Image (cartoon, grey):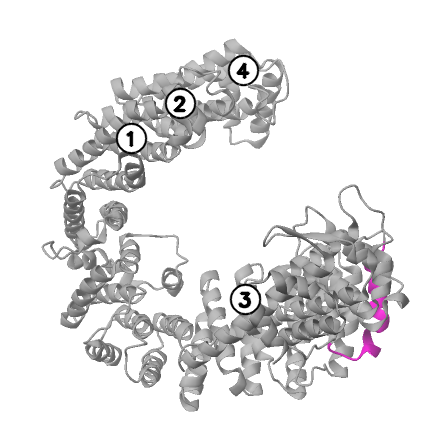
């Protein structure tokens, strides 16, 4: 059967005929690859064949190329393959299709793919004339197909070495330059050439690694000068032309200028006449702004898209121009142009789906336009430009009338973006803006999107002017109440979404829990919960993430004022929101991180009530998962995450009630034993450990030893695939090391993890295990580590001690530092000769120090650091204002993530500084000369800090 016949069969609507034809073609190619390839390319180049058949021939060719072309493809099935004659015919056929500008677009797209695919293994050795052929077609025939292919090659195939080898790159960029200067070349082709040139610029950035200074002077410097002149000439010549193709081309030209900026500076030493470039840039922005406004009126979506794309590139280039040139007072004011380009289409004001609005406002939308780029520019421009635009925009905000909703929203958007600039506005007319905001929020006839923009702008304005606005607390409270009254009464999803978003803005700079009075706090909290419940019903993933972020802020801000009813309401909402998209990592993270605040300082009765309301559903999810014999379930992972946080955060008194412990223990244990997924089992194991740490051992002690047997069971070998350190610590917590029947496996596992030279996993939990054994039974620890045979490189004990040193020097967890400090002190005062004879390289100064001296030096450095921290904290307390959120969250979350105290059950009341001071005092009393040697080598200031700490 002929290839055309088989291709027709493959396109048959009948499944059996289609499959027979596919199998026959596969068999034919396996039997005779050269003939099959030749017939396929003949069919593809046959103008009498239908476009679909030609396209299918190329698609088959593309598939078979990976199997029969060359051993360079991983799926190559082996010789004889296509053969050189077949390859040559295929290459020539593909290029003939490419050369025909009348070939259908979908066919050309597949041709380009096939050529790039072949070049991935053949170029340049097997196809040396390809670049010359493409360059020639571009210059002589203005082939846009050749431009597109060359772009693909430069982007994906041609490496830096290939680009600079045999002047290949020089030929390509000179082809681009010559073609751009050709007045007969179509605008679309010139735009494509510039897209090709953008990729060439990326290659040229590495020119110094591949090109000699002679070649630099010979071709690159002249080329860059000529290209800059060419771009300037094109921008000048098209200055007044507002055709869509010209606007698109100018955008590509400005992108080229942006990409060339650093290259020009490094190779040419300058970017030419930037005053001239600034003029043509501002002219382009002005003309584009006027065209954009007209296109909005005419609802010309295609033209709007072209202008947006072009303006993004133009404004990006404006950011490259030195600010002192833009600050020139003789330059025309471009604020009005910016406002026009920030105008939203009328249909945006008629949006019915608030999810799109939330995605855009929270920066999660895939769309990006000139409005966004202008926002980026004004939020990071120089102080002088910033002040000028701010004054101008504020003036326009105050002058605009209520019947110009689009213009008013654009002015407010630009003002909001200006508020994101780090420079404080210091607006003398701040009261005028606040009066405008009140007027908008109180106006029932004001369009929703203007109100929404105002609601989002107000907190940004407060944040920017927090240091200069009088009575900032009262203003924040006043406008939060005003926002609530405006949004809740309207029952508009967009206003409710704006309330939620603005709340996250407020909490980013203001400690609302302390600056709002009780009544306002409760009104705001209930209004937010009502808004979240309303929005939840139709929320998509991005919106759910926002709602959960707001939930977190609600709980964090007012957890100390929330009664059981409110906590129950919040918990139910968290469960609803998170279970809507349990496979979304952000949603799970946001929901779980709220729980510790919800459970903070809760009494035992309320804690039990909350457990009663949600634990049955968690256990049901676990049971259903096992019964249905699933291999994975996001919902059960979510349930275990919630369960873990509950069990990790017990009520006041740090003790989970017997009732709760009994209810949940057996389901967790059985789940761990039967769970087929190791990662889910790890989460369940973590929940068990938290339960054990916070409940009566009589419930879980026997189960704990069963689970230890399970994780070390050679048949399941859980210890090899998941983190079982927490349950090891738990077993050490309830037994002395020498009495623990798993101590050998625990130490072997811990040491293997700590000394693994290729470790990618965190080692904190294994450090804690080491410290636990040291502090409980140092002789057992030393006996074990010194019983391990010495390797050729470094002894296991040395590696372990090095891990303890590294942890102390790099880890900033207070509890971890205290554990390691105490453990190293134990090792120091053990006076074990095997330790004292060892030495370690100190990377801080390159000195090799004996074991004891290394510890003294390390502790001295840390004592100095702790003293400096104390002084800094005292200064910060004096400077602290009473509105900015204090860094409670960072400290609290780090404490939540620090399981040292929880897992060991040991509370170290002493501060780290006290532990270090006690160490040095003990060292003095023991007459150990290590301290004297270290003090001798410290500078005077460090020595004084240590001595003053010792004699406080």
Between the C-alphas of marks 2 and 1, the distance is: 31 Å
Q: In the depicted view, which residue is nearer to us: 224 or 292?
A: 224
Q: Is residue 630 visible?
A: no
The residue range painted magenta reads: 694-713
Between the C-alphas of marks 3 and 1, the distance is: 66 Å
In this picture, residue 362 sits left or right of residue 771: left
Q: Looking at the image, which residue sits at the far left?
A: 330
Indicate whether 72 appears above or below 837: above
Between the C-alphas of marks 4 and 3, the distance is: 85 Å
Which mark identifies residue 193? 1
Which mark identifies residue 940? 3
Q: In the rendered image, which residue does mark 2 sit on?
A: 50
Of circles 2 and 3, the one toward us is: 3
Position of residue 47 measured from the top left corner of the image (x, y, whole percent):
37, 17
Q: In the depicted view, which residue is nearer to us: 404 or 254?
A: 254
Q: In the rendered image, which residue does mark 4 sit on?
A: 36
Of circles 4 and 2, the one toward us is: 4
Of circles 4 and 3, the one toward us is: 3
Is tag 2's residue or tag 3's residue first in the polypeptide sequence?
Answer: 2
Between the C-alphas of marks 2 and 3, the distance is: 89 Å
Is tag 1's residue or tag 4's residue first in the polypeptide sequence?
Answer: 4
């Amino acid at each position: 059967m002929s290839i055309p016949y088989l291709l027709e069969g493959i396109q048959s609507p009948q499944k059996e005929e289609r499959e027979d034809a596919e199998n026959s073609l596969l068999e034919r190619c396996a039997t005779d690859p050269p003939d099959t390839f030749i017939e396929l390319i003949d069919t593809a180049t046959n103008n009498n064949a239908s476009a679909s058949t030609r396209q299918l021939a190329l698609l088959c060719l593309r598939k078979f190329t990976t199997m029969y072309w060359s051993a360079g493809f991983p799926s190559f099935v082996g010789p004889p393959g296509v053969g050189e004659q077949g390859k040559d015919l295929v290459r020539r056929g593909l290029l003939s299709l490419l050369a025909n500008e009348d070939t259908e677009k979908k066919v050309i797209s597949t041709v380009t793919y096939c050529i790039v695919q072949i070049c991935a293994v053949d170029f340049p050795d097997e196809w040396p004339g390809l670049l010359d052929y493409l360059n020639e077609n571009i210059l002589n025939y203005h082939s846009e197909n050749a431009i597109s292919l060359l772009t693909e090659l430069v982007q994906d195939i041609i490496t830096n070495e290939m680009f600079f080898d045999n002047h290949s790159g020089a030929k390509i960029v000179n082809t681009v330059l010559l073609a751009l200067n050709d007045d007969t070349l179509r605008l679309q082709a010139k735009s494509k050439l510039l897209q090709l040139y953008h990729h060439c610029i990326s290659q040229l950035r590495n020119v110094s690694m591949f090109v000699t200074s002679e070649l630099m002077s010979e071709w690159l410097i002249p080329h860059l000068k000529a290209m800059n002149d060419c771009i300037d000439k094109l921008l000048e010549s098209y200055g007044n032309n507002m055709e869509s193709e010209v606007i698109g081309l100018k955008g590509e030209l400005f992108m080229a200028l942006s990409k060339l900026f650093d290259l020009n500076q490094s190779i040419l030493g300058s970017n030419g006449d930037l005053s001239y470039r600034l003029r043509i840039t501002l002219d382009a922005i002005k003309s584009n702004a006027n065209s954009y406004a007209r296109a909005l009126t005419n609802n010309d979506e295609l033209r709007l898209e072209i202008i947006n794309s072009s303006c993004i590139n133009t404004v990006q280039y404006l950011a490259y121009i030195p600010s002192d040139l833009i600050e020139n007072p003789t330059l025309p004011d471009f604020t009005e142009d910016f406002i026009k380009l920030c105008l939203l289409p009328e249909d945006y004001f008629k949006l019915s789906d608030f999810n799109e609005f939330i995605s855009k406002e929270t920066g999660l939308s895939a769309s990006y336009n000139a409005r966004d780029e202008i926002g980026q520019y004004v939020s990071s421009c120089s102080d002088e430009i910033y002040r000028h635009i701010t004054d101008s925009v504020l003036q326009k905000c105050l002058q605009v009338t209520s019947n110009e909703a689009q213009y008013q929203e654009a002015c407010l958007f630009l003002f909001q973006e200006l508020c994101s600039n780090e420079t404080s506005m210091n607006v003398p007319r701040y009261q005028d803006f606040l009066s405008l905001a009140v007027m908008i929020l109180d106006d029932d006839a004001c369009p929703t999107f203007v109100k929404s923009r105002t609601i989002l702008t107000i907190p940004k304005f407060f944040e920017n002017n927090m240091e200069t606005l009088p009575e900032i607390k009262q203003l924040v409270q006043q406008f939060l109440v005003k926002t609530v009254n405006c949004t809740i009464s309207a029952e508009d999803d967009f206003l409710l979404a704006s309330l939620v978003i603005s709340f996250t803005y407020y909490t980013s700079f203001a400690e609302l829990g302390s600056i709002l009075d009780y009544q306002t706090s409760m009104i705001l909290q209930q209004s937010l919960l009502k808004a979240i419940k309303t929005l939840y019903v139709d929320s998509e993933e991005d919106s759910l993430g926002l709602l959960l972020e707001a939930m977190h802020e609600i709980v964090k801000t007012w957890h100390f004022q929330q009664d059981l009813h409110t906590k129950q309401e919040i918990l139910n909402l968290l469960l609803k929101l998170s279970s809507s998209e349990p496979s979304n990592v952000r949603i799970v993270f946001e929901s779980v991180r709220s729980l510790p605040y919800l459970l903070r300082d809760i009494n035992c009765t309320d804690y039990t009530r909350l457990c009663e309301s949600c634990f049955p559903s968690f256990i049901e999810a676990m049971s259903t998962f096992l019964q249905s014999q699933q291999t994975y379930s996001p919902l059960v992972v979510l349930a275990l995450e919630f369960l873990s946080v509950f069990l990790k955060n017990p009520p006041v008194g740090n003790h989970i009630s017997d009732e709760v412990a009994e209810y949940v223990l057996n389901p967790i244990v059985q789940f761990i034993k039967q769970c087929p997924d190791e990662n889910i089992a790890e989460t369940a194991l973590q929940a068990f450990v938290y339960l054990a740490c916070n409940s009566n051992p009589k419930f879980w002690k026997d189960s704990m030893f069963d689970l230890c047997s399970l994780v070390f069971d050679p048949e399941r070998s859980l210890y090899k695939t998941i983190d079982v350190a927490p349950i090891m610590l738990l077993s050490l917590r309830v037994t002395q090391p020498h009495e623990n029947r798993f101590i050998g496996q625990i130490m072997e596992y811990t040491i293997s993890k700590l000394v693994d030279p290729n470790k990618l996993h965190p080692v904190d939990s294994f450090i804690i295990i080491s410290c636990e054994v040291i502090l409980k039974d140092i002789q057992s620890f030393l006996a074990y580590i010194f019983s391990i045979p010495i390797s050729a490189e470094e002894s296991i004990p040395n590696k372990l001690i090095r891990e303890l040193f590294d942890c102390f020097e790099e880890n900033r967890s207070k509890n971890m530092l205290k554990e390691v400090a105490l453990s190293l002190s134990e090792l120091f005062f053990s006076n074990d000769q095997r330790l004292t004879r060892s030495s370690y390289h100190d990377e801080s100064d390159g000195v090799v120090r004996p074991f004891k001296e290394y510890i003294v030096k390390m502790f001295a450095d840390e004592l100095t650091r702790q003293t400096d921290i104390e002084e800094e904290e005292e200064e910060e307390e004096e400077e602290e204002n009473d509105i900015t959120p204090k860094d409670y969250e960072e400290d609290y979350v780090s404490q939540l993530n620090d399981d040292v105290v929880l897992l060991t059950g040991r509370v170290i009341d002493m501060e780290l500084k006290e532990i270090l001071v006690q160490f040095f005092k003990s060292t003095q009393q023991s007459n150990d000369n290590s301290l004297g040697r270290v003090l001798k080598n410290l500078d005077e200031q460090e020595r004084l800090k240590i001595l003053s700490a010792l004699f406080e």
